[in-house]
Amino acid sequence: MADRSLRTGATVRELLREACRDLAHLESARLDAELLLAQVLGIRREGLYAHPELEATEPAALEFRALIGKRRTEYPVAYLIGRRGFWNLDLEVTPATLIPRPETELIVAAALEQIPAQAAWRILDLGTGSGAIALAIASERPACTVYATDIDPKTLATAEVNRAAGDLPNVHLQQVDWLINFGETAFDLILSNPPYVASGDPALYTGETAHEPRLALDGGVDGLGPIRRIIPAAFDHLKIGACLMLEHGATQGAAVRALLAASGYQDPETLRDLAGHERVSLGNRP
């Protein structure tokens, strides 16, 4: 066990060495320790390397050790510092929001490939969470109007903080259960990163995921419950020729393509993420 005594004048080097011992069971121990110490000291991470002999105050050392104690339990670093980078954005995240994943940037890239640079499309992001997908697209396509929905008011409050911080007036947030309340509104593109983890999957109860909101992860018995609701409902809200894009689990591509085809979508296909896993499936309304 690391020495827990509070020493006046502990340096950056000493605090990081101690934290890495405490977090040795985590692959990201060094990175985690650096991010947390930089947060506590109010400096950029590079500053830790530039000034390893910088002395932390006793309150700062106490705060840092408290954060390391939480991280030992695999409590997510993103929640501890309240931020997560995504696309070109620095997003606020809270325990009420799913932490944006790097693989989710694939659906943003796929959407931007379809949206002409100056297009004034109407776009719908279902289950927006922190607003990651909607805000990333809106920042790249300012002429578009992006509607972002979520059923959880706490989640929407965080998305609003991120919308305001990004100065993105072309994003409109609404508390909606998937596509209910949209009437006959038609969109040029609908996309979603819905819950898609099966209820019995051990991943829901282990590691960092165990600390994230179950509502944003649990997709029912086979993980496809929300996707089954979205696919037929979205069809009637798409303009002719418009596309539905869905993120899903690495083994769910074939099932999602079959659901798209069964609902009348044209030429369903699946895109792979950087790890080679099937990650985003899409189809067009004919």
Image: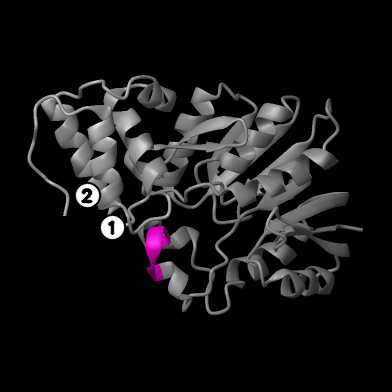
Q: Main secondary structure of the magenta part?
A: helix
Name the element at disc 1. Answer: loop
Report x, y in % for residue 182. 66, 49
Residue beneath the point at 83% across and 25% down: 118
Crowding at label 1, few (<14), some or many (≥20) Cα neighbours within 10 Å?
few
Q: Amino acid at mark 2?
A: Gly
Membership of 166 in magenta stretch: no
**In this rendering, position of residue 263 left or right of residue 61:** right
Residue 160 tag number: none
Residue beneath the point at 49% across and 31% down: 162
Kindly check if marks 2 and 1 are in contact, taking CB atoms under 8 A apart as contact: yes
Question: Is 227 in front, or is 250?
Answer: 250
Q: Amino acid at mark 1?
A: Thr
Q: Is residue 20 above or below residue 87?
A: below
Question: Is 147 in front, or is 243?
Answer: 243
Question: Is 103 in front, or is 126?
Answer: 103
Q: Is residue 170 above or below residue 195?
A: above
Residue 73 tag number: 1
Name the element at disc 2. Answer: helix
Residue 69 tag number: 2
Asked if residue 3 can be seen in this view, the reply is yes
Q: Is residue 234 above or below residue 138?
A: below
Image: magenta residue range: 205-209
Q: Report how many numbered discs are placed on residues in the image.
A: 2
